[in-house]
Protein backbone atom coordinates (compact mmCIF):
# COMPACT_ATOMS: atom_id res chain seq x y z
CA UNK A 1 0.00 0.00 0.00
CA UNK A 2 1.21 3.51 -0.70
CA UNK A 3 0.04 6.95 0.33
CA UNK A 4 -0.55 10.45 -0.95
CA UNK A 5 1.62 12.77 1.14
CA UNK A 6 1.42 16.56 1.25
CA UNK A 7 4.27 18.64 2.69
CA UNK A 8 3.05 22.09 3.69
CA UNK A 9 5.94 24.55 3.83
CA UNK A 10 8.01 22.38 1.48
CA UNK A 11 10.42 25.23 0.63
CA UNK A 12 11.36 25.86 4.27
CA UNK A 13 14.23 24.45 6.30
CA UNK A 14 12.10 21.70 7.88
CA UNK A 15 9.98 21.15 4.74
CA UNK A 16 13.06 20.39 2.64
CA UNK A 17 14.23 18.00 5.34
CA UNK A 18 10.81 16.32 5.25
CA UNK A 19 11.21 15.68 1.52
CA UNK A 20 14.69 14.28 2.09
CA UNK A 21 13.53 12.11 5.00
CA UNK A 22 10.56 10.65 3.10
CA UNK A 23 12.82 9.77 0.21
CA UNK A 24 15.74 8.41 2.25
CA UNK A 25 13.50 6.20 4.39
CA UNK A 26 11.57 4.91 1.36
CA UNK A 27 8.27 6.07 2.79
CA UNK A 28 5.60 4.47 0.58
CA UNK A 29 4.57 7.58 -1.36
CA UNK A 30 2.22 7.16 -4.32
CA UNK A 31 1.99 10.92 -4.92
CA UNK A 32 3.79 13.80 -3.27
CA UNK A 33 2.29 17.28 -3.04
CA UNK A 34 4.74 20.09 -2.22
CA UNK A 35 2.92 23.15 -0.93
CA UNK A 36 4.11 26.63 0.01
CA UNK A 37 2.99 30.23 -0.34
CA UNK A 38 2.15 31.96 -3.60
CA UNK A 39 5.73 33.35 -3.62
CA UNK A 40 7.15 29.86 -4.25
CA UNK A 41 4.56 28.44 -6.68
CA UNK A 42 6.41 26.89 -9.62
CA UNK A 43 9.68 26.53 -7.74
CA UNK A 44 11.38 23.19 -8.31
CA UNK A 45 12.69 21.24 -5.30
CA UNK A 46 14.95 18.17 -5.30
CA UNK A 47 13.19 14.95 -4.33
CA UNK A 48 15.59 12.03 -4.38
CA UNK A 49 16.90 11.65 -7.88
CA UNK A 50 13.92 13.54 -9.30
CA UNK A 51 12.32 16.91 -8.68
CA UNK A 52 9.00 18.22 -7.50
CA UNK A 53 7.21 21.43 -8.47
CA UNK A 54 5.81 23.52 -5.63
CA UNK A 55 2.15 24.51 -5.77
CA UNK A 56 0.36 27.21 -3.83
CA UNK A 57 -1.38 26.14 -0.62
CA UNK A 58 -5.15 26.55 -0.83
CA UNK A 59 -8.35 25.03 0.54
CA UNK A 60 -8.41 22.47 -2.31
CA UNK A 61 -4.84 21.26 -1.74
CA UNK A 62 -5.77 18.19 0.34
CA UNK A 63 -8.03 16.26 -2.02
CA UNK A 64 -7.12 12.56 -1.68
CA UNK A 65 -4.22 13.27 0.70
CA UNK A 66 -3.54 10.59 3.37
CA UNK A 67 -0.81 12.36 5.36
CA UNK A 68 -0.36 16.14 5.53
CA UNK A 69 2.98 17.07 7.10
CA UNK A 70 2.86 20.74 8.07
CA UNK A 71 5.85 22.97 8.72
CA UNK A 72 4.72 26.42 7.70
CA UNK A 73 4.29 28.15 11.05
CA UNK A 74 1.46 28.41 13.54
CA UNK A 75 -0.96 30.65 11.64
CA UNK A 76 -0.92 28.43 8.53
CA UNK A 77 -1.41 25.37 10.78
CA UNK A 78 -4.31 26.99 12.61
CA UNK A 79 -6.07 27.84 9.35
CA UNK A 80 -5.26 24.83 7.17
CA UNK A 81 -4.83 22.00 9.73
CA UNK A 82 -8.60 21.58 10.18
CA UNK A 83 -9.19 21.93 6.43
CA UNK A 84 -6.72 19.11 5.70
CA UNK A 85 -8.21 16.95 8.47
CA UNK A 86 -11.72 17.55 7.14
CA UNK A 87 -10.56 16.43 3.70
CA UNK A 88 -9.56 13.12 5.34
CA UNK A 89 -5.82 13.58 5.86
CA UNK A 90 -3.98 12.73 9.05
CA UNK A 91 -2.32 16.04 9.89
CA UNK A 92 1.09 16.02 11.58
CA UNK A 93 1.95 19.60 12.42
CA UNK A 94 5.38 20.83 13.39
CA UNK A 95 4.29 24.27 14.62
CA UNK A 96 3.28 25.25 18.14
CA UNK A 97 -0.34 25.93 17.07
CA UNK A 98 -1.93 22.69 18.32
CA UNK A 99 0.60 21.28 20.77
CA UNK A 100 -1.17 22.12 24.00
CA UNK A 101 -4.73 21.49 22.75
CA UNK A 102 -6.12 18.71 24.98
CA UNK A 103 -7.73 17.12 21.92
CA UNK A 104 -4.44 16.96 20.02
CA UNK A 105 -1.85 14.33 20.91
CA UNK A 106 1.73 15.57 21.21
CA UNK A 107 3.84 12.67 20.06
CA UNK A 108 7.41 11.41 20.14
CA UNK A 109 7.25 7.83 18.81
CA UNK A 110 9.91 6.47 21.20
CA UNK A 111 8.02 7.90 24.18
CA UNK A 112 4.24 7.98 23.69
CA UNK A 113 3.24 6.54 20.33
CA UNK A 114 0.02 5.16 21.83
CA UNK A 115 -1.26 8.74 22.25
CA UNK A 116 -1.34 9.14 18.45
CA UNK A 117 -4.25 6.70 18.20
CA UNK A 118 -6.62 9.18 19.84
CA UNK A 119 -6.90 12.24 17.60
CA UNK A 120 -10.42 13.68 17.68
CA UNK A 121 -9.39 16.65 15.54
CA UNK A 122 -7.50 14.53 13.02
CA UNK A 123 -4.37 16.42 14.04
CA UNK A 124 -1.19 15.18 15.71
CA UNK A 125 1.33 17.74 16.96
CA UNK A 126 5.07 17.36 16.57
CA UNK A 127 6.79 18.78 19.68
CA UNK A 128 9.37 21.54 19.90
CA UNK A 129 12.82 20.39 18.76
CA UNK A 130 14.57 20.91 22.12
CA UNK A 131 11.86 18.97 23.93
CA UNK A 132 11.96 16.01 21.51
CA UNK A 133 15.63 15.20 21.96
CA UNK A 134 15.44 15.65 25.73
CA UNK A 135 12.48 13.31 26.24
CA UNK A 136 13.96 10.62 23.97
CA UNK A 137 17.04 10.64 26.22
CA UNK A 138 15.10 10.80 29.50
CA UNK A 139 12.20 8.39 28.92
CA UNK A 140 14.10 5.17 29.82
CA UNK A 141 15.40 6.86 32.99
CA UNK A 142 11.91 8.12 33.87
CA UNK A 143 10.48 4.61 33.45
CA UNK A 144 13.10 3.24 35.84
CA UNK A 145 13.36 5.89 38.56
CA UNK A 146 10.64 8.50 37.92
CA UNK A 147 11.91 12.01 37.24
CA UNK A 148 11.27 14.66 39.85
CA UNK A 149 13.10 17.68 38.48
CA UNK A 150 15.00 18.62 35.30
CA UNK A 151 17.32 21.61 34.96
CA UNK A 152 18.12 22.11 31.28
CA UNK A 153 20.20 24.64 29.36
CA UNK A 154 20.07 24.54 25.58
CA UNK A 155 22.65 25.42 22.92
CA UNK A 156 20.33 25.72 19.93
CA UNK A 157 21.31 25.99 16.28
CA UNK A 158 20.10 28.75 14.00
CA UNK A 159 18.43 26.33 11.55
CA UNK A 160 15.63 25.97 14.12
CA UNK A 161 14.61 29.52 13.25
CA UNK A 162 14.27 28.62 9.56
CA UNK A 163 16.13 28.97 6.33
CA UNK A 164 16.46 32.76 6.51
CA UNK A 165 18.07 32.56 9.95
CA UNK A 166 20.92 30.39 8.65
CA UNK A 167 21.50 32.84 5.78
CA UNK A 168 21.56 35.64 8.34
CA UNK A 169 24.17 33.85 10.48
CA UNK A 170 26.45 33.17 7.50
CA UNK A 171 26.16 36.74 6.18
CA UNK A 172 26.95 38.09 9.65
CA UNK A 173 29.97 35.79 10.00
CA UNK A 174 31.30 37.04 6.65
CA UNK A 175 30.75 40.66 7.73
CA UNK A 176 32.61 40.14 11.02
CA UNK A 177 35.56 38.46 9.27
CA UNK A 178 35.68 41.25 6.68
CA UNK A 179 35.53 43.91 9.39
CA UNK A 180 32.23 45.22 8.04
CA UNK A 181 29.18 46.30 10.09
CA UNK A 182 26.92 43.42 11.09
CA UNK A 183 23.33 43.60 9.89
CA UNK A 184 20.56 41.62 11.55
CA UNK A 185 17.42 40.64 9.66
CA UNK A 186 16.09 37.57 11.48
CA UNK A 187 18.04 37.87 14.74
CA UNK A 188 17.52 40.77 17.09
CA UNK A 189 21.23 41.57 16.96
CA UNK A 190 24.60 39.97 16.30
CA UNK A 191 24.35 36.16 16.24
CA UNK A 192 27.69 35.36 14.58
CA UNK A 193 30.50 34.91 17.14
CA UNK A 194 27.92 35.49 19.85
CA UNK A 195 25.42 33.69 22.10
CA UNK A 196 21.86 34.90 22.67
CA UNK A 197 19.18 33.96 25.15
CA UNK A 198 16.03 33.15 23.24
CA UNK A 199 14.32 36.46 22.59
CA UNK A 200 10.63 35.74 22.19
CA UNK A 201 9.18 36.68 25.58
CA UNK A 202 6.85 34.45 27.58
CA UNK A 203 5.42 34.75 31.11
CA UNK A 204 7.38 35.55 34.24
CA UNK A 205 10.55 36.59 32.43
CA UNK A 206 10.98 33.19 30.80
CA UNK A 207 11.06 32.96 26.99
CA UNK A 208 8.31 31.30 24.99
CA UNK A 209 10.80 28.57 24.05
CA UNK A 210 11.45 27.91 27.76
CA UNK A 211 7.75 27.48 28.51
CA UNK A 212 7.44 25.06 25.59
CA UNK A 213 10.01 22.82 27.29
CA UNK A 214 8.09 22.95 30.58
CA UNK A 215 4.61 22.19 29.23
CA UNK A 216 5.51 19.86 26.37
CA UNK A 217 7.78 17.64 28.50
CA UNK A 218 4.93 17.05 30.96
CA UNK A 219 2.37 16.37 28.24
CA UNK A 220 4.59 13.90 26.33
CA UNK A 221 5.72 12.07 29.48
CA UNK A 222 2.12 12.11 30.77
CA UNK A 223 3.27 13.37 34.17
CA UNK A 224 2.39 16.90 35.29
CA UNK A 225 4.45 16.51 38.45
CA UNK A 226 7.75 16.72 36.56
CA UNK A 227 9.51 20.00 37.33
CA UNK A 228 11.38 21.61 34.43
CA UNK A 229 13.71 24.58 34.95
CA UNK A 230 14.80 25.70 31.48
CA UNK A 231 17.21 28.23 30.00
CA UNK A 232 17.11 28.28 26.19
CA UNK A 233 20.00 29.81 24.31
CA UNK A 234 20.77 30.27 20.62
CA UNK A 235 24.39 29.68 19.57
CA UNK A 236 26.10 30.40 16.24
CA UNK A 237 25.81 26.80 15.06
CA UNK A 238 24.20 26.14 11.68
CA UNK A 239 22.49 22.87 12.57
CA UNK A 240 22.19 20.56 15.61
CA UNK A 241 20.95 21.35 19.10
CA UNK A 242 22.91 20.51 22.27
CA UNK A 243 21.62 20.41 25.82
CA UNK A 244 23.13 20.25 29.26
CA UNK A 245 20.62 18.35 31.41
CA UNK A 246 20.64 17.87 35.20
CA UNK A 247 18.04 15.37 36.42
CA UNK A 248 16.81 14.46 39.89
CA UNK A 249 14.69 11.34 40.43
CA UNK A 250 12.25 9.98 43.02
CA UNK A 251 14.62 7.04 43.46
CA UNK A 252 18.39 7.50 43.29
CA UNK A 253 20.25 6.38 40.17
CA UNK A 254 23.93 6.06 39.26
CA UNK A 255 25.65 7.02 36.04
CA UNK A 256 26.47 3.34 35.46
CA UNK A 257 22.79 2.35 35.75
CA UNK A 258 21.79 5.20 33.42
CA UNK A 259 24.31 4.05 30.82
CA UNK A 260 22.94 0.52 31.03
CA UNK A 261 19.39 1.82 30.52
CA UNK A 262 20.38 4.01 27.58
CA UNK A 263 22.74 1.58 25.81
CA UNK A 264 19.97 -0.01 23.75
CA UNK A 265 17.27 2.61 24.16
CA UNK A 266 15.03 3.36 21.19
CA UNK A 267 16.38 6.30 19.15
CA UNK A 268 19.44 6.80 21.38
CA UNK A 269 23.13 6.43 20.65
CA UNK A 270 25.09 6.26 23.87
CA UNK A 271 28.50 7.93 23.72
CA UNK A 272 29.98 6.46 26.87
CA UNK A 273 33.70 6.46 26.29
CA UNK A 274 35.67 8.11 29.13
CA UNK A 275 35.82 11.87 28.82
CA UNK A 276 38.17 12.75 25.99
CA UNK A 277 38.27 16.28 24.63
CA UNK A 278 36.62 16.38 21.21
CA UNK A 279 35.09 12.91 21.65
CA UNK A 280 31.77 13.79 23.23
CA UNK A 281 28.74 14.39 20.98
CA UNK A 282 28.82 17.60 18.92
CA UNK A 283 26.17 19.21 16.72
CA UNK A 284 28.51 19.23 13.72
CA UNK A 285 28.86 15.44 13.93
CA UNK A 286 25.17 14.90 14.70
CA UNK A 287 23.96 17.06 11.81
CA UNK A 288 22.55 14.98 8.98
CA UNK A 289 22.00 11.91 11.18
CA UNK A 290 18.94 10.45 12.92
CA UNK A 291 19.81 9.49 16.53
CA UNK A 292 19.74 11.39 19.78
CA UNK A 293 23.30 11.23 21.11
CA UNK A 294 23.67 11.05 24.88
CA UNK A 295 27.12 11.50 26.37
CA UNK A 296 28.96 12.73 29.43
CA UNK A 297 26.63 10.86 31.78
CA UNK A 298 27.90 11.72 35.24
CA UNK A 299 26.82 11.24 38.85
CA UNK A 300 26.05 14.73 40.11
CA UNK A 301 28.78 15.88 42.47
CA UNK A 302 26.45 17.88 44.72
CA UNK A 303 23.05 16.16 44.61
CA UNK A 304 23.26 12.47 45.56
CA UNK A 305 21.46 10.10 43.18
CA UNK A 306 21.07 12.77 40.48
CA UNK A 307 22.65 12.83 37.00
CA UNK A 308 24.15 15.22 34.50
CA UNK A 309 23.95 14.47 30.79
CA UNK A 310 24.89 16.04 27.45
CA UNK A 311 22.26 15.49 24.74
CA UNK A 312 22.79 16.32 21.05
CA UNK A 313 20.62 15.78 17.98
CA UNK A 314 19.91 17.17 14.52
CA UNK A 315 17.07 19.59 15.26
CA UNK A 316 15.77 19.52 11.68
CA UNK A 317 15.68 15.71 11.62
CA UNK A 318 14.81 14.15 14.99
CA UNK A 319 13.75 17.58 16.24
CA UNK A 320 11.27 18.05 13.40
CA UNK A 321 11.10 16.24 10.03
CA UNK A 322 12.18 12.77 11.11
CA UNK A 323 9.91 12.74 14.15
CA UNK A 324 6.93 13.65 11.93
CA UNK A 325 7.77 10.96 9.35
CA UNK A 326 8.33 8.36 12.10
CA UNK A 327 4.85 9.09 13.46
CA UNK A 328 3.39 8.44 10.00
CA UNK A 329 5.50 5.26 9.60
CA UNK A 330 4.32 3.83 12.89
CA UNK A 331 0.68 4.67 12.13
CA UNK A 332 0.99 2.77 8.85
CA UNK A 333 2.48 -0.24 10.64
CA UNK A 334 -0.39 -0.30 13.13
CA UNK A 335 -3.06 0.05 10.42
P1 LIG B 1 7.51 30.21 1.16
O1 LIG B 1 8.90 29.71 0.88
O2 LIG B 1 6.66 30.26 -0.06
O3 LIG B 1 7.49 31.49 1.96
P2 LIG B 1 11.10 28.47 7.19
O4 LIG B 1 10.68 27.86 8.50
O5 LIG B 1 12.39 27.91 6.68
O6 LIG B 1 11.09 29.96 7.23
O7 LIG B 1 9.97 28.03 6.11
C1 LIG B 1 8.60 28.34 6.26
C2 LIG B 1 7.79 27.57 5.22
O8 LIG B 1 6.41 27.91 5.37
C3 LIG B 1 8.14 27.92 3.79
O9 LIG B 1 8.00 26.79 2.98
C4 LIG B 1 7.09 28.96 3.44
O10 LIG B 1 6.81 29.07 2.08
C5 LIG B 1 5.89 28.38 4.15
N1 LIG B 1 4.86 29.40 4.38
C6 LIG B 1 4.95 30.52 5.13
N2 LIG B 1 3.81 31.23 5.08
C7 LIG B 1 2.97 30.55 4.27
C8 LIG B 1 1.62 30.76 3.81
N3 LIG B 1 0.91 31.81 4.18
N4 LIG B 1 1.08 29.82 2.98
C9 LIG B 1 1.80 28.74 2.60
N5 LIG B 1 3.06 28.48 2.99
C10 LIG B 1 3.64 29.37 3.82
Image (tube, rainbow, N blue to C red):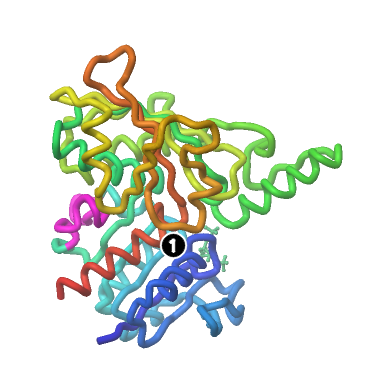
Q: Dividing the picture into quarters, in which one does residue 70 lie?
A: bottom left
Give the labeled residue for mark 1: 71
Left or right of residue 109, residue 271 in this image:
right
Instruction: Residue at 16%, 56% (x, y): give it.
Output: 115
Instruction: Residue at 20%, 42% (x, y): give it.
Output: 140
Q: Outermost residue, right direction?
A: 179
Q: Which x, y percent locates residue 17?
A: 48, 65
Front residue (pair 117, 55): 117
Q: Which x, y percent locates residue 203?
A: 38, 29
Residue 306 in view here: yes
Left or right of residue 267, residue 187 in this image:
right
Q: What is the magenta range? A: 101-116
Q: Which x, y percent locates residue 68?
A: 35, 72
Q: Which x, y percent locates residue 34?
A: 48, 77
Q: Dividing the picture into quarters, in which one does residue 142 lie?
A: top left
Front residue (pair 181, 131): 131
Instruction: Residue at 14%, 24% (x, y): give it.
Output: 250
Instruction: Residue at 35%, 48% (x, y): give it.
Output: 269
| In this view, 308 is above or below 330 | above
- Residue 160 is inside the magenta segment: no
**Mark 1 C-beta to ligand 1 under 8 Å:** yes
Helix, strand or loop at mark 1: loop
| In this view, 118 is above or below 31 | above
Front residue (pair 129, 210): 129
Q: Quadrant of the C terminus?
A: bottom left
Amino acid sequence: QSFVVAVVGATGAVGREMLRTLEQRNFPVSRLVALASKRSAGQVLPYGKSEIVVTELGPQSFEGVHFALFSAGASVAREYGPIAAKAGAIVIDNSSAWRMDPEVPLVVPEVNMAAAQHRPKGIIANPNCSTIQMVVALKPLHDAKRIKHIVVSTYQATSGKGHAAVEDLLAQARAVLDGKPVEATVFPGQMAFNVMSDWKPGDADYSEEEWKMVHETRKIMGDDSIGVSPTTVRVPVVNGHSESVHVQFHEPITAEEAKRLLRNADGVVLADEPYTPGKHPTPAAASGTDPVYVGRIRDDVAVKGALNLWVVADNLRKGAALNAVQIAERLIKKA
